Amino acid sequence: MVKSEIIKQLHQKYPELNRSQIEAIVNIFFDTILDNLAKDRPVELRDFGRFSVKRIKEKYNARNPKTGEVIYVPAKKKVSFKMSKHLKQEINKEKQEWEKIFS
């Protein structure tokens, strides 16, 4: 699902809001998450999950797989997501229901 589909679904659910208003709300939501992650602050959304920034150490003797040459890879950051227990249960609910039917 892409951002435009999210905006479309929200507009169908809340027709009293304009698309431009919904788009502004969605953009503010994502920009707030981005700003906090850029400042190395974790973002937790209850019953959904937690976004955090993890640092990857630099590598002094990594190898280029094509040439075999030793190269330096600088340290960098990546975004990590850990889902909440509630989200995990919701995702696996369908599987559990099928297991009850076929057991």
Image (tube, grey):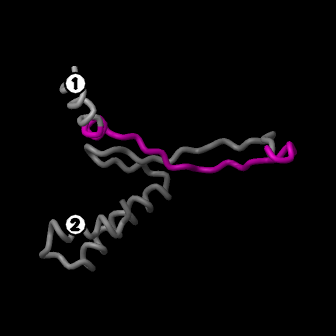
Q: Is residue 89 above or below residue 42?
A: above
Name the residue tied to disc 1: 102
Q: Quadrant of the N terminus?
A: bottom left
Residue type of the residue flagged with mark 1: Phe
Was residue 14 drawn as part of the magenta stretch in this picture? no
Q: Secondary structure at mark 2?
A: helix
Count numbered badges in the picture. 2
Was residue 66 drawn as part of the magenta stretch in this picture? yes
Could you give the CA–CA distance between mark 2 and mark 1, rounded to whole angstroms? Answer: 36 Å
Of marks 2 and 1, which one's residue comes earlier in the chain? 2
Residue ID at (24%, 77%)? 19
The spot of residue 89 in percent (x, y) is 26, 35
Q: Quadrant of the C terminus?
A: top left
Q: Is residue 73 above or below residue 100?
A: below
Which label sits on residue 10? 2
Q: Quadrant of residue 10?
A: bottom left
In the image, the segment drawn in magenta is: 65-91
Residue ID at (46%, 55%)? 37
Q: Nearer the viewer, residue 8 or 57?
A: 8
Which label sits on residue 54? none
Q: Nearer the viewer, residue 57 or 82?
A: 82
Residue type of the residue flagged with mark 2: Leu
The spot of residue 9 in percent (x, y) is 23, 65
Residue ID at (28%, 69%)? 7
